[in-house]
Amino acid sequence: MSAAGSVLVIGGASDIGRAIARVYAEAGRPVVLAARNASRLQTDATDIQLRGGVPVTLLDLDILDSSTFPAFLDAVGDLPGTVISVVGLLGDQAQSSIDPAIAETVMRTNYIGPALLLGEIANRMERRGSGTIIGISSVAGDRGRASNYIYGSAKAGFTAFLSGLRNRLATKGVHVVTIKPGFVDTQMTKGMKLPPLLTASPLEVANAVAASEQRRRDIVYVRPIWRVVMGVIGAVPEKIFKTRMKS
Ligand SMILES: NC(=O)c1ccc[n+]([C@@H]2O[C@H](COP(=O)([O-])OP(=O)(O)OC[C@H]3O[C@@H](n4cnc5c(N)ncnc54)[C@H](OP(=O)(O)O)[C@@H]3O)[C@@H](O)[C@H]2O)c1
C-alpha cells in the first residue's frame, strides 16, 4: 500500500465514483468501492484493478441505513487515508414538493446519510491524527431555486456540514474538501440539455478531486467559471430572484 493509504469511495457505483476510483488506482492507491449491491461492480473493479495494479474491494452500503454504518466500517478494516463521498440523488422536484416521503429520501441521501457516515469517519481520523475527507456537494446548494430546492437544500446542508468539519479538524491533521462540480454528464443528468461550457465529464471531476487532495484545497468548483456564475446568481437580490429567475 502507498504511504497515503487506501481510498474509500462512498457511492462507488456512480459515474463520478468509478472515474475517481480509476484515477486513484492509477496513482497507486488501493480502492474500496461502497455501493448498494456492490457485486454488480465486479467488472469495473477488475478493470480498475488491472489498470492500477492495486487491490479494489467491493462493499455493500445503503447510505439511508445508518444502523449498518458500524458494521460497514468494521468491514472496511484499517481506516482509509482518504474517504470520498459521491453518493447523491437528484430526484424529481415536482414529485418531491408534493410527496414528503420522496422529499425525505432526497434529503437523507444527499445530506443526512453522508453527513452521519463522514462524521463517524472524521472522529476516527481525528483520533488517528491524519486523513482526508472529500465530499461531492453541488452548486445547487449555493442558492435555493424553484426548480431544484429539495435537492439543493440537502446539498446546502452537506456543504455547511463539510465546512464545519473542516474548521473543527483544521488543526487535527484531517483535511476536508468540498467539491462543487457544476453540471456533469452522468446518469443523473441523462436526457438533460446541458451547456457544454458549464458541463464537466466524470473524469474531469475525478481529476479535480485528486488534485484537491494533493494541493490541500478547501472548496473546489470543478470548472472555475461556476464560481463566477454562482457569485452573480448569489448577488441577485431575493426580490428580483423570486420573480424573474424562476428556473
Ligand atoms: N451529474 C451532475 O450534474 C452533478 C452535479 C453536481 C453534483 N453532482 C453530485 O455528484 C455525485 C455523483 O452523481 P453522478 O452525477 O455520478 O450521478 P449518479 O451516477 O446517479 O450517482 C449517484 C450515486 O448515488 C448512489 N446512491 C443513491 N442512493 C443511495 C443509497 N441509498 N445508498 C447508496 N448509494 C446510493 C447511486 O447508487 P445506485 O447506483 O445504487 O442508484 C449512484 O451510484 C452526487 O452526489 C451528485 O449529487 C452531480
Image: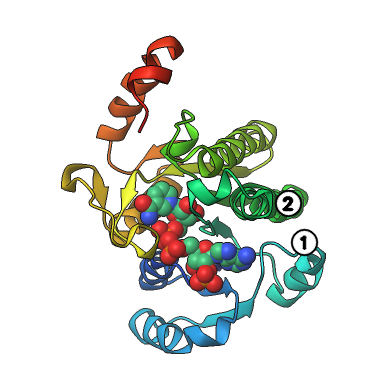
Question: Residue at (73%, 72%) from the top-left corner?
Answer: 72
Question: Residue at (39%, 67%) from the top-left corner?
Answer: 15
Question: Residue at (27%, 58%) from the top-left corner?
Answer: 201
Q: Look at label 1 and name its amino acid.
A: Ser
Residue with the most extreme left position = 196
Q: How far across and down, in percent of the image, does residue 78 sit?
A: 70, 70
Q: Quadrant of the C terminus?
A: top left
Q: Is residue 85 visible?
A: yes
Q: How far across and down, in percent of the image, does residue 183 sit?
A: 32, 47
Q: Is residue 29 left or right of residue 129?
A: left
Q: How far across and down, in percent of the image, does residue 9 sit?
A: 53, 65
The correct choice, above or below, for 82 with respect to 129 in the image is below
Q: Look at label 2 and name its amino acid.
A: Leu
Q: Which residue is mark 2?
A: 116
Q: Residues within 10 Å of mark 1 (few under 14, many from 20)?
A: some
The correct choice, above or below, for 58 with respect to 102 in the image is below
Residue with the most extreme front position = 98
Q: Are marks 2 and 1 in contact (CB under 8 Å)?
A: yes
| CA distance for labels 2 and 1 | 7 Å
Q: Residues within 10 Å of mark 2 (few under 14, many from 20)?
A: some
**Label 2 lies in ligand 1 vicinity (Cβ under 8 Å):** no
Q: Which residue is mark 1?
A: 66
- Nearer to me, 155 or 202: 155
Look at the image and name its color scheme: rainbow
